[in-house]
Image (tube, grey):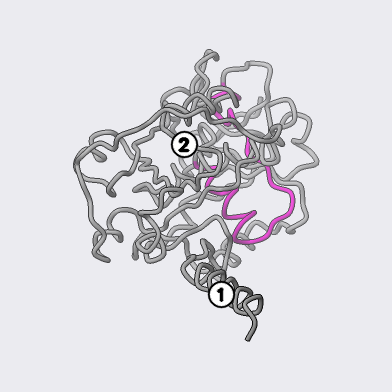
């Protein structure tokens, strides 16, 4: 055998072995989910950065080793008279730089609310064309059940110069002007609780109670298996749940909640798990809408 053939065979074996060591980050339902089992295999890789999207107190009681704590306040734009608006691209770049993230890293996010918090960050990053993000089902509870180690130590962070490599597509974003113009020809889905939808109650930050006219109601939490590890329900179950709304997968759909967090979760369910083609999340949601007297709204007994 000539040295050239030997060299080629050596390179082939080397590449093959390298590929075998790689653990594909994938899920049969969507590439944006990762199982706890899979993260256990790859969490120590340098390019894997884990975000713990829980409140500081919960994080300090124990988190996945080297996980970086993040919360809603970190990803909002405060330049509004109401809260919860999506952080601008430059704000996100500054945040990710401060947290030591490179544009080549893969972000794995977990929370303790059935991925509701994590989905908001996924939604923001999708609008800014950053796809290397995965949501881990089961949270830290399942992580510990499978033998994953936790720590109370804070990770050492080295500041980077993170930049989004593409212009924002805003592919899952919609603002109040588009919602207003789409009231009569879009499907609007209110993902809050039934009491919030009917106007029986409203959360802090909203100026009044009620919902946007012509909205259908579907509580975001219907998608979560609360009798298990708070993972998503099966695809079959999810299909049956959303069939109740009598909508087609090609219909133009706008989802909203109180501040665009729960509806970001529903955006994930509809687009990534159920293959709905035209879904957008209203960023300001009811918090913003309720602050404008000229915008129409509806509650239990009054149409304005």
Looking at the rendered structure, which numbered label has been put on residue 84?
none
Q: Name the residue at the bottom extreme.
A: 1
For marks 1 and 2, give the CA distance: 35 Å
Residue 302 on image: x %, y %: 60, 29
Q: Residue at x 27, y 57 (%)?
A: 141
Q: Position of residue 280 (x, y in %)?
A: 67, 42
Give 298 or 256, whichever is nearer the viewer. 256
Mark number for residue 101?
Answer: 2
Tag 2 secondary structure: loop
In magenta, the rendered stretch is 262-290
The secondary element bearing badge 1 is classed as: helix
In the rendered structure, the answer to whether residue 153 lies left or right of residue 209 reads left
Q: Pinpoint residue 45: horizontal percent, then vertical percent.
A: 40, 53
Residues packed near mark 1 inside 10 Å, few (<14), some (14 to 19) or many (20 plus): few
At x 38%, y 62%, the residue is: 36
Figure check: 239 above or below 2? above
Quarter holding the N terminus? bottom right
Which residue carries the number 1 mark? 10
Q: Is residue 20 magenta?
A: no
Quarter of the image with the C terminus is top right
Question: Closest to the observer: 50 or 191?
Answer: 50
Which comes before the other along the chain, label 1 or label 2? Answer: 1
Residue under the image location 56 percent in, 28 percent down: 86
Q: Residues within 10 Å of mark 2 (few under 14, many from 20)?
A: many
Q: Residue at x 45, y 35 (%)?
A: 200
Taking the image as shown, residue 59 lies to the left or right of residue 95, namely left
Q: How many marks?
A: 2
Q: In this picture, is 17 found above or below 230?
A: below
Looking at the picture, how far across and down is residue 43, in whole percent?
37, 55
């Amino acid at each position: 055998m000539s040295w050239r053939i030997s060299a080629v065979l050596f390179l082939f074996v080397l590449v093959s072995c390298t590929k075998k060591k790689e653990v594909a980050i994938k899920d049969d339902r969507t590439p944006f989910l990762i199982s706890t089992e899979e993260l256990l295999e790859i969490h120590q890789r340098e390019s894997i950065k884990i975000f713990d999207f829980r409140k500081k107190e919960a994080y300090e009681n124990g988190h996945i080793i080297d996980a970086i704590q993040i919360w809603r306040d970190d990803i909002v734009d405060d330049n509004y008279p109401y809260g919860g608006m999506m952080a601008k691209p430059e704000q996100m770049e500054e945040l990710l730089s401060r947290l030591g993230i490179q544009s080549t890293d893969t972000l794995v996010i977990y929370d303790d609310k059935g991925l509701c918090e994590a989905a908001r960050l996924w939604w923001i990053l999708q609008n800014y064309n950053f796809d290397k993000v995965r949501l881990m089902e089961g949270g830290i509870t399942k992580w510990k059940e499978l033998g994953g180690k936790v720590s109370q130590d804070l990770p050492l962070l080295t500041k980077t110069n993170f930049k989004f490599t593409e212009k924002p597509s805003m592919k899952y974003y919609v603002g109040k002007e588009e919602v207003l113009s789409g009231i009569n020809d879009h499907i609007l889905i209110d993902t809050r609780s039934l009491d919030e939808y009917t106007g029986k109650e409203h959360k802090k930050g909203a100026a009044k109670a009620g919902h946007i006219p012509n909205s259908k109601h579907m509580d975001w939490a219907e998608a979560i298996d609360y009798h298990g590890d708070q993972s998503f329900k099966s695809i079959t179950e999810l299909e049956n749940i959303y069939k109740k709304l009598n909508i087609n997968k090609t219909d133009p759909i706008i989802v909203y909640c109180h501040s665009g967090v729960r509806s970001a979760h529903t955006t994930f369910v509809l687009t990534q798990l159920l293959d709905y083609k035209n879904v957008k999340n209203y960023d300001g949601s009811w918090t913003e809408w309720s602050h404008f007297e000229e915008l129409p709204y509806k509650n239990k007994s009054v149409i304005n």
